Image: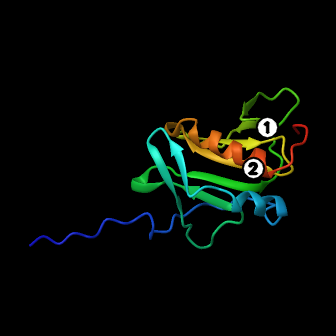
Amino acid sequence: VLVRDPVPDADTVRLPVAAVPTPAAASADCARLLSGLPGEIPTDGGLQPRRVLAEPVPAATVAWGGEDGAPPIVLRCGLSRPAELTPTASLLEVAGVEWLAVDDRDPVSTTWVTVDRAVYVGLTLPDAAGSGPIEDVSRGIKITLVSRPAG
């Protein structure tokens, strides 16, 4: 008789996520954004479920996917102004939201930060995820967060 350890279930295994400074995490803007985020997010690999985070749960942080050792999609609300945001910085507009790629030195993921909203929101995307997550999150941000000039 072979005995196998059960395969961990993404619904029961808590996902560890590193904490980063989020000075505006307790803002009403972050609370409003986080309450409207979807339970699943589309990627090129299919829908990724929202994950329960391991303790200590970083403030104003949610994640999707990350099963089987794959990097998760991580959203953080209330970040500090990114150092990379300069007058000549290259921005990407997605669904009416301006994003800036920041250098997080991760070879398999890219972190994007909103620069035209009342609070800075970061979205770390595995390179294999495609554009679905940033499109989905951008629509939610456009609805819930007041726009402001980039900067």
Q: Residue at x 53, y 52 (%)?
A: 72
Name the side, left or right, on which 143 lies relative to 131.
right
Tell me the distance, in whole angstroms, between the alpha carbons under discs 1 and 2: 14 Å
Vertical comparison of 94 with 72: above or below: above
- Quarter of the image where one finds residue 58: bottom right
Q: Position of residue 43 (x, y in %)?
A: 51, 42
* Picture colour scheme: rainbow
Q: Residue at x 70, y 55 (%)?
A: 76
Q: Residue at x 74, y 31 (%)?
A: 93
Vertical comparison of 13 with 49: above or below: below
- Quarter of the image where one finds residue 22: bottom right
Circle 2 is placed at which residue position? 121
The quarter of the picture where the C terminus appears is: top right
Mark 1: secondary structure: loop
Mark 2: secondary structure: strand
Vertical comparison of 4 with 87: above or below: below
Name the side, left or right, on which 7 lies relative to 46.
left
Which label sits in the foreground, 1 or 2?
2
- Residue ranking furthest to the right: 149
- Residue ranking furthest to the left: 1
Q: Amino acid at mark 1?
A: Glu
